[in-house]
Image: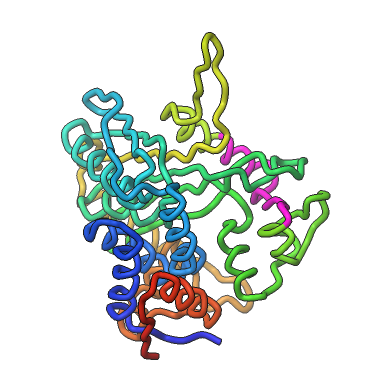
Amino acid sequence: MEYRVKVEKMRQIIEAVYERAGLKTVDAKRVTDNLLFADMRGIYSHGLVKVPTYVRWIEEGKIKISPQIQMVQESESCATIDADFAPGSVAGVHAMDYTIEKAKKCGLAMTTVKNGTHFGAAAYYALRAVKENMIGIALTNSVKLMAPYGGYERELGTNPICIAVPGTKTIVYDGATSIAAYNKIFLANAENRHIPDNWALDNKGHSTTNPEDVVVHGGAVRPFGEYKGYGLAVMVQILTGILSGGSIVREKNEVKENVDATAYSFMVIDISKFTELEAFKKTVDIFGERLKKSLKQDGVKEIYLPGEIEELKYKESEEQGIKIHEDVIKSLKQTVENLKMKFELDY
């Protein structure tokens, strides 16, 4: 069963949870905002379902409550930042905003971030560039969860890609390179649901509909489009983990790979440095309308642009509250009570 909960009520609860767990107020607000953003857009796999996990990581020291985020190296248009295992959204916003400022000067800028933690929905960062009438790109790797095409061991992250483009209707592609994000399988397991048989493999290489085979027993998610998603995942790993230096380990005279390093890359394009801004946005609108007005297959009521459904869900959430599954509420309640806090929620 699902419930509708007022956004601001849930915001108050989760901010208090993260402060009790040890985050500074400003960081607790940022992490909470990031998770609510995902749920409000209908990306439930990256929303409040992650609260217990983040709290546990804070308690275990995997997420630092007082990180020392610092510049590793930079040039006029490029930078590498060491996040020092800060909350992902804290380091991610810091890096994206820094990239935006560089792009205003150079037209095109890129920042890589090493020693990161899970940063939630990639669109949260790319859309910050859109607010400045720029194109935003956000990439992240993840821990090993996905099998390479033709294999069945976990060797790659799900490695999402987000590109956000300004127009009257912002166009936002935000998707993992796996058929389904691991957190969708995680959520299905939390809600005791089966998954489609093409999403994942069990630990013997067989297709499975049981999310427990992945979440508990170490099965792997599958790349989308077979070799296509696999190839993109490889490139994201190179552009994040390896390019940032986070995956590079130097031992004496040898270079080795840190296979568990989380890293991000942010790119920003100042449209005005390439073409006239308003003409660009108008042409994006015309292009989008052409797609939406094209002939539809039988049974299809509307053709949506990338990110359009998520934006409609966001507005619905603002008006009606966010949808939360009862199992997620139970998990939140347990986390709150473990922190010796009261859990009071109106539906």
Looking at the picture, how far across and down is residue 114, in whole percent?
A: 40, 35
Looking at the picture, how far across and down is residue 284, in whole percent?
A: 33, 54
Residue 293 in view (yes/no): no
Q: Residue at x 32, y 50 (%)?
A: 65
Specify the quadrant that holds the C terminus.
bottom left
| Range covered by the magenta-colored residues | 217-234
| 281 on left or right of 144 | left
In the displayed structure, 315 sits above or below 51; it is: below
The residue at the far bottom in this view is: 347
Viewer-side residue, 128 vs 344: 344
Looking at the picture, how far across and down is residue 103, in whole percent?
A: 22, 36
Residue 219: in magenta span = yes
Q: Residue at x 60, y 71 (%)?
A: 190
In the displayed structure, 18 sits above or below 322; it is: above
| 212 on left or right of 265 | right
Find residue 333 and report its image quarter.
bottom left
Looking at the picture, how far across and down is residue 69, in whole percent?
A: 28, 38
The residue at the far left in this view is: 105
Q: How is the image coloured?
A: rainbow
Viewer-side residue, 238 vs 5: 5
Q: Residue at x 36, y 66 (%)?
A: 37
Viewer-side residue, 183 vs 224: 183
